[in-house]
Amino acid sequence: MTISRIQSGRLSLSRCFGPALCLVAISIRAAALAAAPPTADDWPCWRGPTHDGQASAGQVVPHSWGDAEHVLWTVDVPGRGNGSPTVVGSRVYLATCDEATGSQSVLAYDRVTGKPLWQRQVHVAGAMRKNEKSTGASATVSADGGRLFITFPNSDAVFCTAIDLDGQVLWQTRVCDYAIHQGYGASPLVHDGRVFVIADHKNRGRVAALDPATGKVLWEKERPPAPNYSSPIVWKLFGRDQLILTGCDKVAALDPATGETLWEKEGATTECVTTTVTDGERVYSSGGYPRNHIAAYRADGSGTISWENGERVYVPSLLYAHGHLYAILDAGIAACFDAATGEEKWKQRLGGNFSASPVMLGDTVFATSETGQTHVFRATPEKFEELAVNRLGDETFASPAICGGRLYFRVAVTSGDKRQEKLVCIGNR
């Protein structure tokens, strides 16, 4: 351990944990930070409060909106990013990247008015991306109530950074080297006093659990050498917490406390973008390269594949509700499957291409296309029941958030060759 900096009452330490995983900054301020947990009125991380795209029950939000109708506020967002809005307490948080300079930042806005509150630059330069749909800020900020956590690909590595609610950097941990293939979009996950981060890539990546107060590595595990983009998720299955990882040609379940492999099964595609959902017995993997598939894996330790099909659900994550899976195929088709058997209940062409994951409130699904069209339909296995189709902006890759009776969208509008991202709040006045 070496003391690298003492400044303004803050002690920073540099420490290595093996050749590829280093703790590059620790703040003593973080150790004493008391974190008030998010509430049911918040959307604290990727895929929301229950990590499955489901909004808290009891809210009432509009099904239809337009340029003025039900738009409570709109604010410009500097830079570019595909990360979803994170809504906690009185604020909305976004990750963004200035593609001209390669800088990466976290932004904070007032939840009620949309007023910009602060911008914290995390990396001055060095952002990484290749695919034209990817960005240097495709992960979603995760919050534990007192801290914010974000992962960025930068300078041939992936870093996880913790920021306090005033925008001050608390610590930063280098997860591992990173060989860019398409981009990076795995969001950090906060669960049971740990921050889980993953960086899969073709030169062998890593999954790790970090201490949320200090960034110290609690455990780490190498991953197979393959490009992959899925975020980690923890589900309680068969009486124990299981950290589920999909992609790199397999589905694996780890013990979140130790990193020990509980079970794993070959059969997933190499590249996955989606985050798994569960019915309590099975976890559902989906991917689109080098082959298309949705598959149901028994989570009882056997990893048995209950069923599989050849549908392409590569980028938008699945929804599970009342014994059924609701999918938005990348090519613009909504579908419903029996979760236990895989039987197709219905399909309906929506049109366009989809990258954003659908979200659900009660029995209503909101699915947004890359051109900013949000299709609102009923989650029922009987038939496709469309409720509304709305347009917001010209381009959308980020998934929306639903909380506190409002919807939050990250969209882009174009005028000539100028592209401007916006954060838009939809609700009943």
Image (cartoon, grey):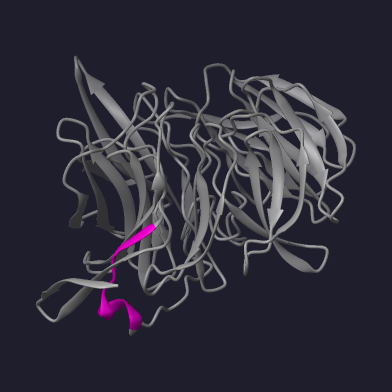
Q: In this rendering, would 315 be left or right of 157?
A: right
Q: Please count the marks in the image.
A: 0
Magenta segment range? 22-31
Residue 397, percent from left and from top: 43, 32
Q: Residue at x 58, y 23 (%)?
A: 330
- The residue that appears at 26% across and 56% down in the rendered structure is 109
Vertical arrangement, residue 282 with respect to residue 49, above or below: above
Residues 117 and 119: in front is 119
Depth order, front residue of 361/289: 289
Task: Name above or below for residue 9 compared with residue 388.
Answer: below
Instruction: Classify residue 82 by image quadrant.
Output: top left
On the image, the x and y values in percent for residue 88 come to 40, 64
Q: Identify the residue at the far left of this view.
A: 8
Q: Is residue 77 left or right of residue 49?
A: left
- Does 375 sit above or below residue 167? above
Viewer-nearest residue: 102 or 120: 102
Q: Is residue 342 left or right of residue 8?
A: right
In this rendering, the answer to whether 45 lies above or below 357 is below
- Residue 380 in view in this figure: no
Residue, x 67% and y 52% (percent of image)? 244
Is 140 magenta? The answer is no
Q: Residue 393: x, y in percent?
A: 34, 28
The quarter of the image holding the N terminus is bottom left
Q: Is residue 70 visible?
A: yes
Q: Along the line of sight, which residue is nearer the eye, 31 or 358? A: 31
Whole-percent x and y of residue 68?
32, 37
Q: Residue at x 87, y 34 (%)?
A: 307
